[in-house]
């Protein structure tokens, strides 16, 4: 590409992204530049507002727009795909030196929680080969790739414009997000044992018995004591389609 043309395009891009810190390219009238800025920024704002409805409503129009302006101006997305911009936005918020310092303390977790729904809806995850009737204690249980155990410091499922706590509760919010056969994403609360088991299934290749033994050790009880409850939990998760069966 001609060097002059390349510099003109880069100058235009810098100005459209952050007009406050980058002068406009010469030879283009201000009215036309304003149209470009509104077109590009408006698309990004519309995408993010649709993907994070609770967060945008909770922050309010002014702070939400200001946040998107910072994201638009400073963050360098690694993908051109509109369907992945929500994840880029979450990663922007998780980057301490990128996100504005005046965000509420619950903002990052709420954004992640809202992104999970989009991610599961759009996922093309293929379930691994498994034996649906396998022995869940002696075999290696297989967790569905469309079932995600989640843990948050803030009560993300209850946050909204009418409920914005300033202090995190003493107990974490433990959830299961999964895409069901109806192609809808469902969230449900998890007890600590269920969350611990699902997180273990997600992280480790172990037999069901080994998973339960590790959990028993972590909470300081004899593994035989939680074996019946743990097996019942595994069977219940299989009935729901969260656990697919065992590895073949």
Image (cartoon, rainbow, N blue to C red):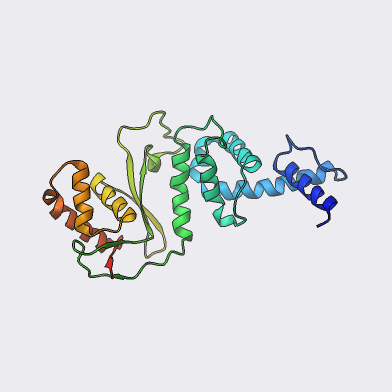
Return the residue found at the far right. 27
Image quadrant assignment for residue 18: top right
Q: Between 157 and 17, which is closer to the camera in this rendering? A: 17
Q: Residue at x 44, y 41 (%)?
A: 109
Quarter occupied by the C terminus: bottom left
Measured as percent of width and height from the top left, residue 1 is found at 80, 57
The reply, left or right, for residue 194 in relation to residue 69 is: left
The reply, left or right, for residue 222 in relation to residue 7 is: left
Q: Residue at x 88, y 45 (%)?
A: 27
Q: Residue at x 61, y 36 (%)?
A: 66
| Up/down of 1 relative to 166, above or below | below
Q: Between 24 and 46, which is closer to the camera in this rendering? A: 24
Q: Between 138 and 154, which is closer to the camera in this rendering? A: 138
The reply, left or right, for residue 27 in relation to residue 70 is: right
Measured as percent of width and height from the top left, residue 51 is found at 52, 49
How many numbered dots are placed on residues in this image?
0
Q: Residue at x 46, y 47 (%)?
A: 114
């Amino acid at each position: 590409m001609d060097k002059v043309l390349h510099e003109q395009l880069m100058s235009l891009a810098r100005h459209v992204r952050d007009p406050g810190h980058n002068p406009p390219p010469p030879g283009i009238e201000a009215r036309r530049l304003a149209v470009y800025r509104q077109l590009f920024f408006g698309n990004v704002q519309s995408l993010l507002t649709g993907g994070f409805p609770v967060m945008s409503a909770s922050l309010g129009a002014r702070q939400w727009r200001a946040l998107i302006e910072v994201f638009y101006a400073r963050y360098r997305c690694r993908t051109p795909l509109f369907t992945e911009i929500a994840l880029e936005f979450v990663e922007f918020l998780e980057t301490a030196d990128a996100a504005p310092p005046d965000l509420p303390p619950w903002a990052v977790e709420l954004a992640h929680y809202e992104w999970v729904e989009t991610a599961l809806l759009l996922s093309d995850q293929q379930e691994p080969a498994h034996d649906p009737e396998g022995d869940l204690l002696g075999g290696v249980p297989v967790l569905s790739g469309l079932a995600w155990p989640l843990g948050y410091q803030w009560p993300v499922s209850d946050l909204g414009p009418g409920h914005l706590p300033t202090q995190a509760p003493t107990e974490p919010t433990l959830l299961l997000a999964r895409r069901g056969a109806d192609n809808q994403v469902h969230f449900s609360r998890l007890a600590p044992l269920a969350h611990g088991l699902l997180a273990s299934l997600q992280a480790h290749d172990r037999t069901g018995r080994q998973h339960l033994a590790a959990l028993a050790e972590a909470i300081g009880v004899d593994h035989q004591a939680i074996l019946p409850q743990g097996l019942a939990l595994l069977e219940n998760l299989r009935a729901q389609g969260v656990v697919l069966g065992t590895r073949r």
